[in-house]
Amino acid sequence: MAFEQQLRVPGPTPIPERVMRSAARPMINHRGPDAAVIIRDLVDGLRWGLQTENDILLFPASGTGGLEAAVANLFSPGEAGLFCSIGSFGDRWADIAAAYGVEAVRLEIPWGEALDPEDVDRVLAEHPAIEKVCVTHNETSTGVVNDMRSIAAVVKGRGKLLAVDSVSGAGVMPLPVDELGLDVVVTASQKGWMAPPGLAMIAVSPAAYRAAAAARCPSFYFDFARQKGFIDQGTTFTTPPLGVMYALQEGLAMLREEGLENVFARHQRVADMIRAGLVAIGLRLLAPEAHRSNAVTAVHSPASSPEQLKAFLAALRTRHGLVLAGGQGQLAGRVFRVGHLGFIEERDAYSILATIEQGLADHGLLSRVGLTVAAAQRVARGTQAAPEPAGAGR
Ligand SMILES: *Cc1c(COP(=O)(O)O)cnc(C)c1O
């Protein structure tokens, strides 16, 4: 029995001690000056992380609430919108739109592949009435990251509004919101931001507000314009999850101390280490090389059946304390997923890899251990500054 679990699902993610202590602070009046200071700090920090001057709206909700907010504010019933899906979360966004009576035109890509910007361009040419496009940045169900730069170039090039689900990508991989011209970007506290679940954070452009003013889908709780009025006054429409906000404030402070480029580089390095380690023992990754996510890796099941995969994951958890995720939807029983976003560094990569190896060996799925760590070490060495110039005579 492990004393403490090592939580490596792609959200919720582990939170640092500093963040945990921060979350335990006493409650305050959410209409008072102390709350205003926190809200302004969160807005500043998220603007920094998302590289945007746009408004940041905070809603008490999980990430799905943020996706629903985007639909409710941007669309009218009967309006056609393009929903690009490369997996389970992309499907969910289109399903939300359908529930609001929006005519969701679905561009569906086989799970495990990335969106081709040319396909987006073609569908937009075929449907000139479409004014708004919704795209998943990082598809957590498949470990595939879309190339938002080329997709934004197509969508913005046609003068359309672009809404992005970056619930699991933001704060992990670069997403320069203003540079790419993204109109709505949804993220959530429990993924890359090192905080508990409970807060949806949405970056909203002036063009998105204009679209919202004209849109007729019903919205109340998630109304952008009203929440903007409250956030601008340093409060929120309803009671916010103060504990989550304390935590997010501290998580953002830690990320800012580290520096944005360093945050992205750390995720790149850790993801590269984990991928190299898994590949070194013959495991196959679902995502194509050019689109592998630095937030989560989906791995084809090494087991002979879904039941054996389930037993393997259960043993990792109960015997070794390592909690990984299974597959979602059509990938259930066929892949497992390693979350490597948020509070993670090199030592965690070694520990995750060695534990996976041990678990595979326990199940007779691997005969020799040690290869993953060696492969990860080569990656880590290759990306660190060399301790001394090559050939310096040792
Ligand atoms: C986690 C996640 C969501 C939202 O999930 P919630 O459980 O509602 O927080 C949405 N999209 C993506 C890509 C995600 O990873």
Image (spheres, grey):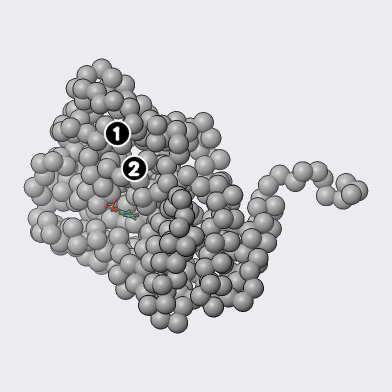
Residue 377 is left or right of residue 170, and the answer is: right
Quadrant in the rendering for residue 323: bottom left
Q: Is residue 145 left or right of residue 72?
A: right
Which residue is depicted at the point 45% across and 46% down? 342
* Helix, strand or loop under label 1: helix
Q: Residue shown at 32%/73% (left/top)?
A: 330
Q: Which of 146 and 29 is in front in this view?
A: 29
Q: Mark 2 highlights which residue?
A: 196
| Dot 1 alpha-carbon crowd within 10 angstroms: few under 14, some 14 to 19, many 20 or more | many
Quarter of the image for residue 369 reads bottom right
**SS assignment at label 2:** loop
Query: Picture coordinates of residue 9 (x, y %)?
Result: 40, 56
Percent coordinates x, y for residue 273 in the rendering = 59, 57
Is residue 35 among the parts visible in the rendering? yes
Residue furthest to the front in view is 1
Ligand 1 under 8 Å from disc 2 Cβ? no
Task: Locate residue 169 relative to residue 230 in the image: left or right.
Answer: right
- Compared with 124, 29 (above or below) is above
- State the residue at coordinates (15%, 33%): 238
Amino acid on which disc 2 is placed: Pro
Q: Can residue 142 be seen in this view?
A: no
